[in-house]
Image (cartoon, grey):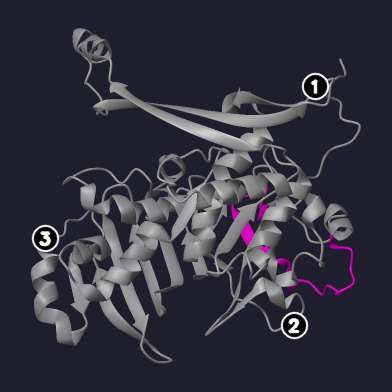
Amino acid sequence: MLLEFSVKNFLSFKDKMTFSMKAASGNENLENIIDNSERLLKTTALYGANASGKTNFVRAFTAAIMMVRLSNNRQIGEKLSQMEPFAFDEETKNKPCEFEFVFISNENKYIYGFIADKNKVYEEYLYQYFSAKPTRIFERTNCTEYNFLQSDEGKLKAIKEKNTDNKLFLATATTWNYNKTKDAYLWFAKNIDTYTGGNFLTDFAIESFSNDNSEELKKFTLKLLEEADIIIKDFSIEIEERDVDNNLMMLFKNLNMPVPEMPQKQRDVKIRMVHEVKDESNTIKSYELNLTNESSGTQILFSLAPILKDVFENGKILIIDEIERSLHPSLVEMIIKYFHNPEINKGNAQLIFNTHDTNLLSLELFRRDQIWFAEKNPEKGATDLYPLDDFPVRKTENIQKGYLNGRYGAIPFVAMGSSLWED
């Protein structure tokens, strides 16, 4: 579970911004809270104008997560392409990016962070809470200087020699079987995912459907579509593998261009959705449509199903850019309510998303601490993050109206009566 995420000097985030999933002290909408050792929010929504930094917020998560996941595959001297500093300042554009996570993995609470640019990792640290005060597992400064947990210093000194400037010690230590970094590393590797662009038909989703021998995923998917008022009675999936066309690789060679890494096999996936309709004599007949011929909303819900099922069962964190893309507002609300429902969200999964859909701005659906705003300073080009809870908002207030009227900021100021079309 995620408690906090901080980012500094990355894309539009110039100054340090801290986003929190910690619930405030209010007792409204208690079903929206995970009330274990920490009071945490199950969902949060981020609002803001276009180009305010909402997508950069998701990109910040993605960059930090992928830094960890890709670390062990990095070659010596390979650039850290995920690192993109704030560009609108002569000082910051030459400084490294900074990230920090506070999270719970396997019932252990950690603080993990690192500072890096495109060339190397300058600082890195991992702390674990064995008591009220965090204990240092390791600290890394000046790229290659380390401080370790005293009891494990001998073992970790040997492991640090295997690390390089462009790799994260968290990943290297776990690879070399250091147990105290394992749960923290696996949290990044398996427990948190980001999605942008509305493409949810990932390799994970396809594999989940193809390996659904018990048909539990099929039942979940059909139920999801039914509750969304999408009448699909069944579906089938065919996966065919074929050899990659060698002519394409020969083309690169003939043009004296480097041959990109390509899979040995290419996979063709055919998904057919079964519809039942009545003909003129009231006879029910079945018809099949390829998933690509279904509506965008149907395609997204279908592709989301294995992700949602996995997230709910395993208590993962799901981060989505523009969740409303191709989905009706009522379907987005349905998904949010799934996360709030303890009968469905049995693993205490968390959903973080950004959106323009103001229909969701309701204190019946959300608590005040679940709504965040992104606002960009027009003079400096830097993004600021802040929660609705920073404002004196009554529990009965119409926050949709307040947001649209500019009370909380984070909306575009559109110039009316513009001279754009005047000669």
Residue marked by disc 3: 162
Comparing marks 3 and 1, which lies closer to the viewer?
1
In this view, the residue in front, 204 or 27, is: 204
- Pick whichever of labels 3 and 1 is earlier in the sequence: 3
- The crowd level at tag 2 (other Cα within 10 Å; few <14, some 14-19, many 20+) is few
Residue shown at 86% from the left, 75% from the top: 394
- Location of residue 337 in the rendering, given as x and y in whole percent from the top left corner: 70, 61
- Pick whichever of labels 1 and 2 is earlier in the sequence: 2
- Location of residue 406 in the rendering, given as x and y in whole percent from the top left corner: 84, 55
Whether residue 12 can be seen here: no
Disc 2 residue type?
A: Asn
Comparing marks 1 and 2, which lies closer to the viewer?
1
Residue marked by disc 2: 27
Disc 3 residue type?
A: Lys
Highlighted range, magenta? 372-399
Q: CA distance from mark 3 to mark 1?
A: 70 Å
Q: Residue 383: within the magenta?
A: yes
In this view, the residue in front, 358 or 212, is: 212
- Location of residue 159 in the rendering, given as x and y in whole percent from the top left corner: 12, 67
- Which residue is at the far top? 254
Q: Secondary structure at mark 3?
A: loop
- The crowd level at tag 3 (other Cα within 10 Å; few <14, some 14-19, many 20+) is few
